[in-house]
Image (tube, rainbow, N blue to C red):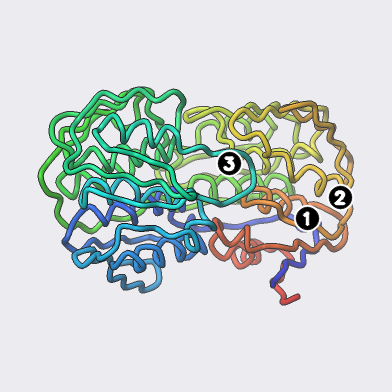
Amino acid sequence: MQKLVITGGTPLRGSVVASGAKNAALPLLASALLTDEPVVFENVPELADITTMIHLLEDLGCKVQRNGHRVEIDASAVNSTEANYDLVKTMRASILVLGPLLARFGKAKVSLPGGCSIGARPVDQHIKGMKALGAEISLEHGYVNAASPKLKGAKILTDMVTVTGTENLLMAAVLAEGQTIIENAAREPEIVDLARCLKSMGADISGEGTVTIVVNGVKKLHGTTYSVMADRIEAGSFLVAGIATGGDVTVTHCQPEYLGSVIDKLLEAGAEVITGDDWVRARSLGRTKAVDIRTVPYPGFPTDMQAQFMALDTISEGASHITETIFENRFMHVPELQRLGADINIDGNTATVRGVAKLSGAPLMATDLRASAALVIAALVAEGESTVDRIYHLDRGYEKMEEKLKALGAKIERVNK
């Protein structure tokens, strides 16, 4: 087990390169199951969740070669269509192999997923969509069993906006006979990235990035080489860290057009924000002002940035209200922030944060991926030393975060417990 030891009080200054997006890379890796030709992915982040997905693909019979940020997958010799519990339990994104396996092989057996304990993430919309495409589905002993000799295009209206559900249905539909229309589709940039990759493999897709995606099924997909988009959540986290510490941070190799709601809130907090074609610079102009947050699906404010902005609000002037509408358990970082001296009260799905003059270092424990980032940000602000335990959560979604922060001037070390 490892932990981070952080001495706060140093403004972050300099540039940091955005890594590839975890939430884009995971469905992209799963999409390699759709073809018997090699697929090469570049700009793949080196993260625990990526390693889990690669192990899952290897367990299914894929040959995977990984060299730094380059991953080549050959799914020509897949010999299993079962994603077992031992691999799936640690990461909810494992459910993303359901659509590709069903589309290409006509059957799939996938354990119900695990992952962070931030709330229920039902797969009912995945199942509803697969049934609409003609699959027979049963739930037995914790597994989703799906079978269909040949999926057929259909009109699918999801009951709620679901990112992984949209991705799974999109991958299933590309090899289905006829046309599939996915209504109430999620609009996240990661879905656009997946659609672009599938199109480079020969898929016929339109409407990605809107609420209606149209897929005309093709008989076969071919191999491709594709570069994963930049991680907008990582980029936002570093921008918030820079402002919270009173610093000046530039994130390069990113896509500012996908950071609109985050940039708007940084400006509202009183920061100076400048954007270029592939970079964003955020500079502190003094103590920030408290900003209200309400999480909603893209293009609204992302739930994955809620905890980081709460950390910023704890030392901002005034009071703020943070409302979480996506996941019901996503305030588990609040008790840890309170240990640093934060003034936060929770009423249902809304937290009221009253800014304090300073935070004081304390031992902390990460509870989930984005909470980990919030605790690191708060510790960078706090006076004295803080420790953050259970950083395996952090390693699921942030590539070498402490090294990047250290390059910006942070006093942070990873140590063995």
Q: Residue at x 68, y 48 (%)?
A: 371
Quick check: marks 1 and 2 in contact, CB under 8 Å? yes
Q: Gap in Å between the C-alphas at discs 3 and 1?
A: 19 Å
Residue 340 is labelled as 2
Question: From what the image shows, is residue 1 above or below residue 156?
Answer: below
Mark 2, Cα crowd under 10 Å, few <14 / some 14-19 / many 20+, is many
Q: Gap in Å between the C-alphas at discs 3 and 2?
A: 22 Å
Q: In this view, does 220 lie to the left or right of 274?
A: left
Residue 97 is labelled as none
- Residue type (three-letter) at the residue carrying disc 1: Ala
Q: Which residue is drawn at 65% across and 66% down?
A: 406
Residue 409's image quarter? bottom right
User: Which residue bears the numbered disc 1?
Assistant: 379
Sequence-earlier tag: 3 or 2: 3
Quick check: marks 3 and 2 in contact, CB under 8 Å? no
Residue 133's image quarter? top left
**59 and 189: which one is in front?**
59
Question: From what the image shows, is residue 301 above or below residue 414?
Answer: above
Give percent across and percent down for residue 126: 39, 36
In front: label 3 or label 1 = 3
Give the total of numbered labels.
3
Mark 3, Cα crowd under 10 Å, few <14 / some 14-19 / many 20+, is some
Mark 3: secondary structure: helix
